[in-house]
């Protein structure tokens, strides 16, 4: 099993930046893909970015050019650097990993973009 802990959320102004981190423990060597999701108030959870064990990266259209996902294998950590933040980026951001068919979610971290 894998356990996840996210951090780095908070309040940012429009145009500002935040960096989220997700630290994994447990069977980290078996992780196939890491993903960041977000859930805005009243909306469904949506995929923001993902990175596979071989380094393939995917971004949602809303994140392209503004967000960067990165992975530090030595620290079992995945980050999400978010720049040029917009009010519509507000939501709870969740880290998610897949080990085979098993999906594990973190507890989420709140991101609020407001002036």
Image (cartoon, rainbow, N blue to C red):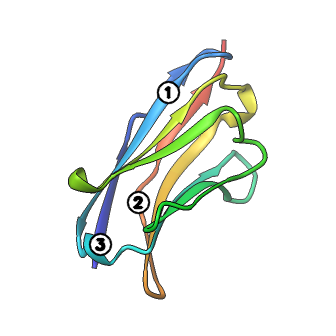
Q: Position of residue 6 (x, y in %)?
A: 37, 48
Q: Give the quadrant of the N terminus.
A: bottom left
Which of the 4 image quarters holds residue 89?
Answer: top right
Compared with 70, 67 (above or below) is: above
Q: Earlier in the sequence, mark 1 or mark 3?
A: 3
Q: Is residue 55 above or below residue 112?
A: below
Q: Secondary structure at mark 1?
A: strand
Q: Earlier in the sequence, mark 3 or mark 2?
A: 3
Q: Nearer the viewer, mark 3 or mark 2?
A: 3
**Residue 71 appears at what percent x and percent y?**
39, 50
1 or 2: tag closer to the N-terminus: 1
| 82 relative to 15 in the view: left or right | left
What residue sits right under mark 3 in the picture? 2
CB-based contact (under 8 Å), mark 3 and mark 2: no
Say which residue appears at 67% left-offset and 16% top-offset. Answer: 15
Q: Which mark is residue 103?
A: none
Query: In the image, which disc is placed on residue 106?
Result: 2
Q: CA distance from mark 1 to mark 2?
A: 18 Å
Q: Where's residue 90, x and y in %?
A: 65, 35
Label 3 crowd (10 A; few <14 / some 14-19 / many >=20) = some
| Mark 1 crowdedness (10 Å alpha carbons): few <14, some 14-19, many ≥20 | some
Q: CA distance from mark 3 to mark 2?
A: 10 Å
Q: Secondary structure at mark 3?
A: strand
In which quadrant of the rendered image does the C terminus lie? top right
Give me the residue at 27% from left, 70% from top. 28
Residue at the image position 60 percent from the left and 25 percent from the top:
83
Q: How many marks?
A: 3
Label 1 and label 3: CA atoms lie apart by 25 Å
Circle 1 residue: 18
Q: Name the residue at 46% across, 51% down.
A: 108
């Amino acid at each position: 099993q894998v356990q996840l802990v996210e951090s780095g959320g908070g309040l940012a102004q429009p145009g500002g930046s935040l960096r989220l981190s997700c630290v994994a423990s447990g069977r980290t060597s078996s992780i196939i893909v890491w993903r960041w999701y977000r859930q805005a108030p009243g909306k469904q959870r949506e995929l923001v970015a993902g990175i596979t064990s071989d380094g393939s990266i995917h971004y949602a259209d809303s994140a392209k050019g503004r967000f960067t996902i990165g992975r530090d294998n030595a620290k079992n950590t995945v980050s999400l650097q978010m720049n040029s933040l917009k009010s519509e980026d507000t939501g709870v951001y969740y880290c998610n990993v897949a080990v085979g068919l098993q999906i594990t979610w973190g507890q989420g971290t709140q991101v609020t973009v407001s002036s």
